[in-house]
Amino acid sequence: MNRRIVAVIASATGVAFTLTGCGAGSATEGKSADEPYRVLVTGGLSAQGVLADNSTTSVLSAKAGAKVVNAAGGILGRKVEVTVVDDAGDPTTAVTKLREAINSDKKPDLFLDSGPSTVTAAVLPILKQNNILSMNVGPTADSSDPKAFPLNFDLSPGPSDYAKGFIPHLKDKGYKRVGIIHGSSSYGETFDAEMTKAFDDAGIEVVKSEEYDVAALDMTPQLQAVRAAGPDALIMDGYGAPVGYLLKSMKKLGWNVPVVANTSVSATGLISTPPPAGVLGTDQVKNLVMQVYTSTKYDAGDKAMNEAVAAMKSLGKIRSTLILGYNYDALPLIAAAAEKAGSLDDPKALARALEEQSVQKKAKTAILNDYHFSATAHRPNADAGVFLFIAPSEIKDGQFQ
């Protein structure tokens, strides 16, 4: 069930973290100069396992972004107030909590989520109806389409972006024939479609693609089918418990093919956790490399990222990889857009500003150094340079070491 979020007032920095309001009343239409810029961030804080840890990191990153912006004077002089809601990772709960916030006397100016994509799909129509700017970390098939949702921006790259990183790696390794194993989730199906197209365009043959039920405990039949096609490498999609079952099934088969996994796998805690809770350092991951962002691999010379980590640590423990830290970038993006628009009161003007390259470059983001939103696509359009492929390693303060 939903648990309450304890209200914390960080008076030293001027940023407020509050409980959700349940009172009735009309949302304030006009915003005075002394009113805060209200941000509602939801996450599956009471969910089970990896989702709870990832949601906690996502929420923490939003708080840290607000803290840094407020320390610099706020946005056009207005302080940012972050309200945290536990949606348990459940779309129905997320919708209920969002409607409560909209109908309170503290209607949010900006909505941030923590995934999964089912939550995004559920809340976007409501946000659109109520003219609320949003940024999300769980992209759907149309979440980045300005025609469908003109006030939403995807912070997370999509499968087509990730494919840009896969292709140079596969070619560098000399893999010409690959198999794909992916989950039955909407993301897994999109990942398969986008990867297959990108590989085909790049001259890399997909010899077999198999989908597994994300609720299954054994993926041996699907893996056997892929193995029979004789790929040079296996492209793996998975998130949470299914990753463990995939690796166990591969061990059961005795299949030692190179495994190239996506960011969902690298965001799964058991990969970076030693036994008995995880598989780090075991034979199950000896042939595995996984896609990460350059920002999620520790670099002493990355000033922006190190400042982001410090801000997050000052507010709480970072419980998962910072590949879930996208929300840190949200407030710097809004700050840059507001400076361009000259106001925080018009979400449509802010959206237009976010589409401008000059605004994106001015934003002091860290998880992704540069976003490439446009008038035709509200997604990062990340290039290959933001990705790395690394072997599993321990995580410290949200970064692979």
Image (cartoon, rainbow, N blue to C red):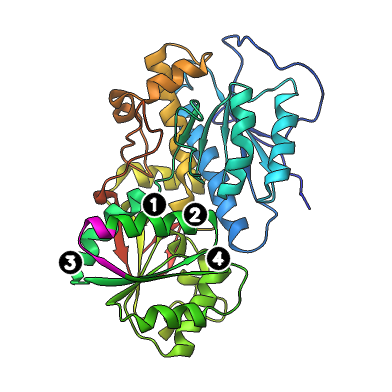
Residue 371 is situated, as x and y percent measured from the top left of the image, at 34, 36
The answer to whether mark 2 and mark 1 are in CB contact below 8 A is yes
The local secondary structure at tag 3 comes to helix
Ranked by sequence position, the earlier of labels 1 and 4 is: 1
Ranked by sequence position, the earlier of labels 2 and 1 is: 1
Reply yes or no: does residue 341 show up in magenta.
Answer: no
Ranked by sequence position, the earlier of labels 3 and 2 is: 3
At a point 42% along the width and 30% down the height, the residue shown is: 332
Ranked by sequence position, the earlier of labels 3 and 4 is: 3
Which label lies toward us, 1 or 3? 1
Ranked by sequence position, the earlier of labels 1 and 3 is: 1
Q: Which residue is mark 3?
A: 172
Name the residue type under label 2: Tyr
- In front here: 125 or 197? 197
Q: Which residue is mark 1?
A: 159
Residue 385 is situated, as x and y percent measured from the top left of the image, at 24, 50
Measured Cα–Cα span from mark 2 to mark 1: 8 Å
Instruction: Identify the mark at residue 187; answer none if there is no mark.
Output: 2
Q: Residues within 10 Å of mark 3 (few under 14, many from 20)?
A: few
Name the residue type under label 4: Gly
Reply yes or no: does residue 203 show up in magenta.
Answer: yes
- Quadrant for the C terminus in the image: bottom left
The local secondary structure at tag 2 comes to helix
Q: Is residue 230 left or right of residue 174?
A: right
At a point 29% along the width and 49% down the height, the residue shown is: 386
Measured Cα–Cα span from mark 4 to mark 2: 14 Å
The local secondary structure at tag 4 comes to loop
Magenta range: 199-206
Name the residue type under label 1: Pro
Q: Is residue 395 left or right of residue 107?
A: left
Ranked by sequence position, the earlier of labels 4 and 2 is: 2
Q: Which residue is mark 4?
A: 240
